[in-house]
Image (spheres, rainbow, N blue to C red):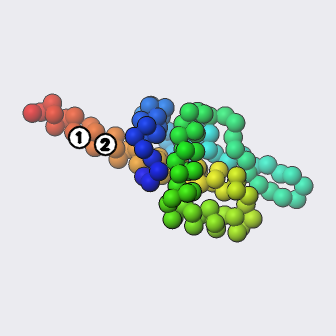
Amino acid sequence: MPGCGALNAAKILGETAGITRFRTKSAYARHNGTAPLPVWSGNRKRHRLARTGNRQLNAALHRIAITQAHYHPAARAYLQRRKEAGNTSTEAIRALRRRLSDVVYRALPNDAHSLTDQSSLQRAA
């Protein structure tokens, strides 16, 4: 994943402690603190950052989001679309973090499956 170095990847793997614990991407987002909370102020409906969840995991996702916001063209385009839709910069970054949480949720089972295949091959040899 663009913007994710070895230390961030290790932090995500360690703090997640097994992706199979989570039934859905929404449950994973709730765990890492990227699930949006609805907030109403007057007639404006918006979402804000949840104060709950694993802050270490959320910080790792935030570092990836900030790196992508600077260097990854797809992330920059996504942030621009969010800002044009009326989001502030903070809200757009929060939305990007949630999107990254979904990407991590989809990627971790594939990595776990390939690791089990490799360890079973090593035991057989």
Q: Which kind of residue does numbered mark 2 sit on?
A: His
Quadrant for the C terminus in the image: top left
Q: Residue at x 75, y 65 (%)?
A: 86
Image position of 34 (left or right of 46): left
**Secondary structure category for the residue under label 2:** helix
Q: Are marks 1 and 2 in contact (CB under 8 Å)?
A: yes
Other-residue count near label 2 (Cα within 10 Å), few / some / many at <14 / 14–19 / ≥20: few
Total residue callouts: 2
Q: Residue at x 60, y 33 (%)?
A: 55
In the rendered view, tell whether residue 97 sits above or below residue 55: below
Residue 6 percent coordinates (x, y): 40, 40
In the rendered view, tell whether residue 121 sits above or below residue 84: above
In the rendered view, tell whether residue 15 sits above or below residue 61: above
The alpha-carbon separation of the residues under discs 1 and 2 comes to 6 Å
Residue 8 percent coordinates (x, y): 46, 39
Q: Residue at x 28, y 39 (%)?
A: 115
Instruction: Tell me, for residue 113, which label it has, or none.
Output: 2
Residue 39 percent coordinates (x, y): 79, 49
Q: Extreme front residue here?
A: 70
Q: Which kind of residue does numbered mark 1 sit on?
A: Asp
Q: Label 1: which residue?
A: 117
